[in-house]
Image (cartoon, rainbow, N blue to C red):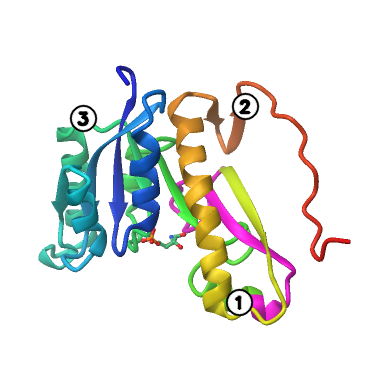
Amino acid sequence: MVNARRTAILISGRGSNMTSLIAAARAPAYPASIALVIANRPDAAGLARAEAEGIPTKLIDHRRFGSREAFDAELDNTLKKAGIELVACAGFMRVMTRDLVEAWRDRMINIHPSLLPSYKGLHTHERALADGVRIHGCTVHFVRHDVDAGPVIAQAAVPVIPGDTPETLAARVLEAEHRIYPLALSLVASGAVTVSGETLIWKAPYAAQTPLLVPSP
Ligand code: GRF
């Protein structure tokens, strides 16, 4: 698509969310194009997946840099040189400096495997199971300097089912991630949502939906 926003995806691992974004962006009317995939680890399996999809890739190995600032500066330069407009973090396991976050403020989004603000950080599925919640899920949000914080763009809720293990629950959440992330990126890239301060602004209101009841009656 001619006006598709040039988007970079940042990964550290297998890249299944990256793959779902690449697939969505192949649709002619999708408002973002995936112009670059950057990994901070040479063993990130997603790199080979992106290459197989014909997407330009770049490895910026964080171990080659003496400081977080130096790594982030290289990342920022790479994004700028490639003419990137939006950044989608997809399993990118690096805490970013305030400078980098501010440079991409309201142009960088992330997916997190919980219904934020619950379960920030790691091991979200284990913690949700330990707490006995009946509904869990995932969140796409704008990136702020505080980890797993920032205006929420979209969330998907999934039921927790008796007998779930962290693995079965993670698999159910991941399926939802693969649906919600392309939706959220398209909302941002098309301008359907914008941010004012810490508040998300919707261009058009969306239709009411039925509640998810767990267990369902
Ligand atoms: C996903 O669960 C994502 O929510 C989290 O890290 C995981 C990345 O998985 N931030 P993948 O690399 O996209 O398969």
Element class at badge 1: helix
Residue kind at label 2, given as amino acid type: Trp
**Mark 1 and mark 3 in contact (Cβ < 8 Å)?**
no
Q: Quadrant of the C terminus?
A: bottom right
Q: Quadrant of the N terminus?
A: top left
Q: Which residue is mark 2?
A: 202
Q: Which residue is mark 3?
A: 83
Q: Which mark is residue 127?
A: 1
Look at 61% across and 59% down and name the residue there: 137
Residue 167 in view: yes
Residue 137 placement, left or right of 111: right
- Tell me if residue 130 is in the magenta stretch: yes
Residue 141 in view: no
Q: How many numbered marks are there?
A: 3
- The magenta segment is 129-151
Look at 53% across and 46% down and name the residue there: 180
Could you tell me residue 25's position as x and y percent?
Answer: 36, 35
Look at 46% across and 32% down and name the residue there: 186
Residue kind at label 3, given as amino acid type: Gly
Residue 201 position (above or below residue 175): above
Element class at badge 3: loop
Cα distance between the residues tagged 2 and 1 = 32 Å
Residue kind at label 1, given as amino acid type: Arg
Residue 6 position (above or below residue 161): above
Q: Residue 201 appears in which quarter of the rendering?
A: top right
**Mark 3 and mark 2 in contact (Cβ < 8 Å)?**
no
Residue 43 position (above or below residue 107): below
Q: Residues within 10 Å of mark 1 (few under 14, many from 20)?
A: some
